Image: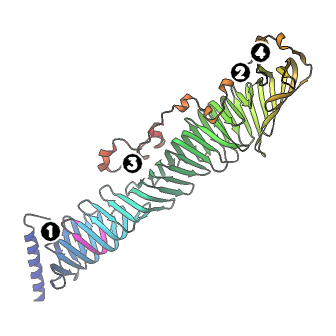
Amino acid sequence: MKTFILFLGICILTTGLWGQQDGEPGTKITIVYGGSFTKDESLKPGASIFSKDRRQVQFEHQGADLWCDYALLYQKENRLEAIGNVRLKQGDSVLMTGGYIEYDGNAKLAKAYQEVRLTNSSMTLTTDTLYFDRERQESYYRDYGKIVDSANVLTSRVGRYYMIPKKYQFQDSVLIENPEYIMESSRLDYYTTSKNAYMYGPSTITGETYQLYCERGFYDTTSEQGYGIKNTEIKYSNRIIEGDSVYFDKIREFASATNNIKVTDTINKGIIRAHYAEVHRAKDSLFATRRAVSVSMMEQDSLYMHGDTLMVTGGPDARVLRAFRNAKFYKTDMSGKCDSIHFDERTGLTQLIKNPVLWNLENQMTGDSIHLISNMETDKLDSLKVLENAFIISEDTVGRRGFNQAKGKDLFGKFIENELKIVDLVKNTEVIYYMYDDDGNLIGINKTKCSKIRLKLEKSDIEDITFITDPDGDIIPEKDFPPDSRKLEGFIWRGDERIRSPEDIFDADDNNLILPVIRGITEPIDLENPEEEDVRQDASPPNPKTSKSTGSVKAQGT
């Protein structure tokens, strides 16, 4: 008899529910299995109370099924409270479990509490409280959650899951843990299918051989490949790479950067600035171009070196720096220019190759090639070689009457405390020198030929000349020395080319560069969500997975 009464009550309730659905088919929560049924208006006004018997209570609503041990169904409000071992399943794709779920049939909104777990084919989400919006196909938590997929473990304080694109949007204390790296961020979007992460706030990725920081960027968490386009910095072995846009590829051991680049050698303390650069970690090499300049310390002074292209190769103890095409350098007491510069840090040898000119204080030196040799123990200039067609010229600073000149096949100089003090010219040497007495009166002009000449300098002025081996010459009065004969054969004064400041190493082409626009700073960089197609308008950096270029940096017009 009791069983019959219970069955009759459930039938009457079910009939009543369906009767309320007239004109609104499928909008009301439906009882699939009611188990034991009671009503207690004093305890739960308006609620139909169900509890499991041999099986759990089951309900259905617009493609979703819910099971629980105990349920309160409010028919008029179309609302359900499910208690104990609750399961909410939507089709074959989503299963949510918890200790307690509130479900609003009108809003199609579920609120789950107590050890909540949301799973699909690719991931598992656990949290204490989870909201599941079936109308918008979104779930979200506000007080820490944890997601586990086949590649990563992700946690954050606030998170939202978009079920159709299978995308998470994490905010506040975001952490991705992977056996190969750890990622921390304040705002990050993550796709569970592609395992791609899009960073929209301060983010740090730390791997075994690198650390990447950016405030906006992309990262493929499976291949450890990505880019940053806002305040980006990569610590890559013994270099720090900064730029407006920086690309990174762990497998290829490669990084590149575009616009306002700074690459710091953390061991040797050197810096390279440019608008495009590449770093190859396996080869320990760096390539830089577009207003490229190397800045290093020499004798407690900054040495600036520029070329259309800069290349650095070799390990920290054996760096080789090359500047190609239109090469120039500057330091306070010395500057120079040529076609290319080759500097070997291990030997301290700097070579100026092809049409070189060197200025030390007021002395101009030219030849077929020029070598500067540094003392590696003291880190100071030691000596100088000008090979083939050596020429040294300085203006007559006393009477301003012309130029002091000396030439020979080769020139060998000696620096003392960074100042050129001794100059030896050998083979077919000649000199023209304006001689003055102690009162500054011109004595005459010395013109001499010799096999070897030694000049002793003081603050670039000739203090003493020693003619060695068969000198042939004399001191000629100024009136007897025609002005058009006061220049040695091969004389070329290049004072107008002299580099007098760090800015002088750049020419007009360097200073008028039009930099490529780094896209994605203000636009979405998320390329995987079809719903965002209308706002993209090809304004974002490409996904490195689908780009055929070296990386996102190159794809932006570098």
Which residue corresponds to mark 3? 525
Which residue is farthest front?
A: 439
Which residue corresponds to mark 2? 493
Calculate the distance from the C-alpha at mark 2 to the C-alpha at mark 3: 56 Å
Calculate the distance from the C-alpha at mark 4 to the C-alpha at mark 2: 12 Å
Which residue corresponds to mark 1? 28
**What's the residue type where badge 2 is placed?**
Trp
Structural crowding at the residue carrying mark 3, measured as other residues with C-alpha within 10 Å and reported as few (<14), some (14–19) or many (≥20)? many
Q: Is residue 224 above or below residue 38?
A: above
* Marks 3 and 4 close (CB-CB < 8 Å): no
Q: Is residue 149 above or below residue 462?
A: below
Q: Closer to us: mark 1 or mark 2?
A: 2
**Regarding mark 2 in the picture, which secondary structure is present there?**
loop
- Choose the circle earlier in sequence order: 1 or 2: 1
Q: Going by the image, does 169 lie left or right of 472?
A: left
**Regarding mark 1 in the picture, which secondary structure is present there?**
loop
Residue 278, image quadrant: top right
Q: Closer to us: mark 2 or mark 3?
A: 2
Asked if the stretch drawn in magenta spans residue 63, the answer is: no
Q: Closer to us: mark 4 or mark 2?
A: 2
Residue 121, image quadrant: bottom left
- Choose the circle earlier in sequence order: 3 or 4: 4
